Image (cartoon, rainbow, N blue to C red):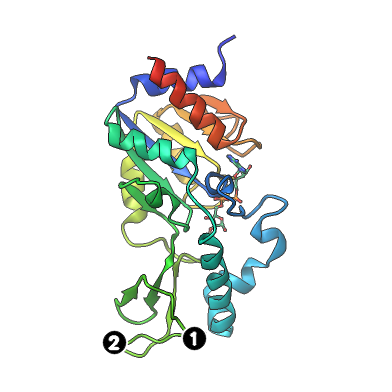
Amino acid sequence: MESGIDKAAALLRVSKRLTVLTGAGMSAESGVPTFRDPDGYWSRFNPAELATPAAFRLDPAKVWEWYRLRRAALRTVEPHDGHRILAAWEKAGRFHVDIITQNVDGLHHRAGAARVIELHGRLELARCTACAYRRDDLDDLGPDPRCPECSARLRPGVVWFGESLPEGAFDTAVECVSAADCLLVIGTSSLVYPAASLSEIAFARGVPTIEINPSDTPISDLVRVRIKRGCRETLLSLEAALAKS
Ligand code: OAD
């Protein structure tokens, strides 16, 4: 019987324009916790106290401290083979690759990927709550940092619950999915909108979709090919299958 890997490799072999949508499961094998798995962040912490504009207004130092700890945790992790394979596909030019990620850890960039749309911002970024000031060197940030240009409060450069995505990011993501001839959805619970609507756009437009996820998600029964395994071993298998063709 043809395996999920064979079916996915067959789609990738004829693809000219691949869009990849990643979530926390992509980083899990680098050692970054996901959000909704049993050992995920939202099993241990209350998102309403850490990842909303109201939480930040109430206690900015507490919110900054949480993001400082998450930045510190990033220093101990590295991109894995799966991140590197996606970056290598982009460079090899076999097909045009766009990566859309919900992850804020920068691991796709660190693996060498250039075309990455970060839908939820990034941990290594602070931005002013009042003006256009941003900084990405956050080493000596105090507990409640201020903008050097207008003295307003600085905030983490990530998207919180109830907020809009960074300007243009979602529109560009929709364009990538609409132009794609294959969508690869890796390691996302497909529960958080608007990111989750990108798969729905692919289904509506008939873009063949492959899901890589060891658990069931709302899109598992809707995708063309479902691979119920971890992302690292799956991408290694796909890479090996493509190398043969
Ligand atoms: P979730 O924690 O909701 O889902 C992670 C998914 O990864 C689950 O479906 C797991 O089954 C899957 N997974 C776990 N290990 C995996 C592996 N080794 N290989 C492949 N998949 C694996 O994370 P997201 O879907 O990314 O938003 O969550 C979306 C957003 O919700 C996040 O960006 C964050 C969060 O609240 C904000 O902070 C705005």
Q: Amino acid at mark 2?
A: Glu
In screen coordinates, is 177 left or right of 26?
A: left
The picture quadrant where one finds residue 125 is bottom left
Q: Residue furthest front?
A: 76
- Determine the residue located farthest toward the top in the rendered image: 1
Q: Position of residue 88 (x, y in %)?
A: 35, 36
Percent x, y of residue 221: 60, 29
Give the position of the N terminus as an image quadrant.
top right
In the displayed structure, 86 sits above or below 6; it is below
Q: Quadrant of residue 126?
A: bottom left
Q: Is residue 84 above or below residue 194?
A: above
Pick the residue in front: 74 or 52: 74
**Where is residue 220 drawn, in percent x and y?**
59, 32
User: Could you tell me which residue is drawn at 61 percent across and 32 percent down?
Assistant: 229
- Kindly state the secondary structure of the residue where label 1 is placed: loop
Disc 2 vs disc 1: Cβ atoms closer than 8 Å?
no
Q: Is residue 89 left or right of residue 34?
A: left
Element at badge 2?
loop
Q: Nearer the viewer, residue 13 or 206?
A: 13
Up the image or down, 129 lies above or below 113; here it is below
Classify the position of the C terminus by image quarter. Answer: top left
Q: CA distance from mark 2 to mark 1?
A: 15 Å
The residue most toward the bottom is: 151
Labelled disc at residue 144: 1
Disc marking residue 149:
2
